[in-house]
Amino acid sequence: MDLHLKNLFDRFQEQFGSGPGLGPGSGTCLMKVEGISSNFIKPLFKASAALYRTEPWRRLRPGHLFGVRVGKDSDWSGKKQPFPCSQFIGGDGGDIGFYMFRSENDAKKMTGPRETIRVPNVELLRVTYELETLMFPSNRKMIKSLSLEASGNDRFPVIDVARCTSSGELQFRNPTLEELKFVYAFLRAISLVHPLLQEDKESGSNWTRLTCFDPFIETVDIQWPPEMARGHELVAVTISHPPGQAYEEKTSSTASSTPTKYAEPPDEATFMDVRVNSNSSSRHCATCEKEVNGEQCLCCGRCRAVVYCTSLCQKQHWKESHKSMCGLYKAMMEREEELVMKIFTFPCSADQPCKWLESLGIHQKGMWRRKCSCYSHCPFGLLPVKGGLWDSWGGLGEEEYPGDVPFRNQLRDGISNPILLSGWSEYYNLRSLPLSTPVADILSHPLTVYYILTALSINSKNLLLKGKEVILHYLGPEGEMDWMPAFAEIGHLLNGLGNIQIVMVGPEVPTSLSGTTSGISSRVRVNLVRGVYQEEATYLPSPHVIVALNCALDRYSNWGGALDLIKSTGVPAFFTEQSEILCANAKQVLRGAGLHITHPVTPNPFRSPVKNHNSSTNLPSYSNGFVLGVNT
């Protein structure tokens, strides 16, 4: 009998709600939203499921308010953010979901110690996760017809906008397409950043059960679904706790402090077996660096990112360092599928570069010789060259690499302009290249440079549009010095307008090449200078922009002087890193040097599609994977 009553009570809670919340969904159906398409509903449900898997309700309660800012105010009707404040409900029982409010004041009015308070004439957008069996027929029909992704165990989000009348009754309406777009950006962003919240154990009150977190603010770039992009593929989303945090408030940051807080991991580490794909390289234990194969590997059962040889090494690493990083690693691992470029048909994993190149028939050929260690004995920039573009691209067919010819039919209103690209698909289409050719792996470097000049650096873009020259300082070149035929593509993309002078400065420039100039195309020339940037910069032409690709800021001590110089000159500078964890480290180095990150970490649309794994983790890395900027 007791079990029967318990089942009845559990079903009553599911059907009518309890604790914080306004009750179950109202029956609004997204298919009835004006202007919506099924191609947007699917990624909306996918983003909702991704958030559900991160389980924010384990730590977050309605009293934890978050500020939300998506893009610019001018992007939204009324020239203001639709719902700039949010909270999670259901952590203590009741309806599981989150509410979004028009203002922080509205959120505080409606947040009671145990229940959600009904305040007249306050409108909020709510997303509640409900069991499919308890949903309205219209929603169940939509889920079945569109094969929408479930959140958790047969739960699905129900999205509506609620408003309490003066008599205390609730009114509901369907959200608008613009409001759903805002929700989508919040779903994607909050699932990435909420694990980074760090508990503030010193300021917590003894008389409250509400966990206190350190003040937090983080900006991430979110990719819109294709049908919502409208020419802008990415949007910057800023999440802050409590609402109203600003970057300028972080004046206490020092070279040793980190402005990003990591999630509190579980009390005890967990373990699981992980098999490494047979075509990937062996791993190294994160603690003792012992080489282990796929059959012997263990990894952290929470983030599934870090590899060990035994449970003893795993426990030691947990105590020493992994405990503070586990939440960040987990957030990164959940983005792996999102970051993979699925358009290409050639093998996209290069943990063993020689085997990868052999599978494509280009091993030890042309520019590909710099993609493995077989020619490490030959200094950068001095690979023997037979001549000819066909040989440079390793003997690929003429239809498989970009020819040294301009783009055709690229006039707009009869006027020549630089070609603006949004990603690899657009480039491959323009060049009529098959998706089976791996040239994107080498072209990642020149096209990342071009993307920075035409999409991220406004000053450089304006100079090119006016037909003027842009001077770019390129720090730390290595293999790029052997890829000059690929850099010639920048000249063709300029499409007859403007010029670019690239000054490559670094200690790896051979003495015999230092001081030379290469006119790799009629609109692009490259100067090579051997030395450390801060020592050579005085003798170089003043730059409009500075670039460092795959810079590993946290691993080389001589970056300190270069960063001091960049700070003193105020020249816009962009850095790329191979992985998100390296970007997190780079942000710490840049902020420690007193540089203000004005362009937050962004997945680079021209990163190399060829994925590598760190030998001690399962975290994927891509050449030029992520870009961030200062002084922009």
Image (cartoon, rainbow, N blue to C red):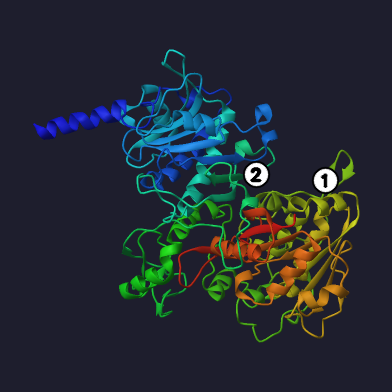
For the point 58% across and 52% down, which residue is it? Answer: 343
Please state which amino acid type lies under the numbered disc 2.
Answer: Glu
Amino acid on which the number 1 mark rests in the picture: Asn
Q: Vertically, is 30 above or below 245?
A: above
Which residue appears at 62% of the width and 33% of the height? Answer: 81
* Figure check: 510 above or below 578: below
Does residue 35 appear to the left or right of 60 in the view shown?
Answer: right
**The quarter of the displayed image where residue 78 is located:** top right
Q: Can residue 527 be seen in this view?
A: yes
Question: Label 1: which residue?
Answer: 409
State which quarter of the image contains the C terminus.
bottom right
Q: Residues within 10 Å of mark 2 (few under 14, many from 20)?
A: some
121 or 574: nearer the viewer: 121
Judged left or right of residue 374, residue 306 is left
Task: Check disc 1: other Cα within 10 Å, few if <14, some if 14-19, many if 20+.
Answer: few
Quarter of the image for residue 397 reads bottom right
- Residue 54 percent location from the top left of the image: 41, 48
The location of residue 65, given as percent across then percent down, is: 48, 40
Any mark on residue 340, and which? none
Query: Label 2, on which residue?
Result: 233
x, y (%) of residue 38?
52, 31
The image quarter containing residue 379 is: bottom right
* Disc 2, SS: loop
The residue lying at 54 percent from left, 69 percent from top is 350
Left or right position of 541 against 12: right
Q: Which of marks 1 and 2 is nearer the N terminus?
A: 2
Question: How far separated are the C-alphas under marks 1 and 2?
Answer: 24 Å
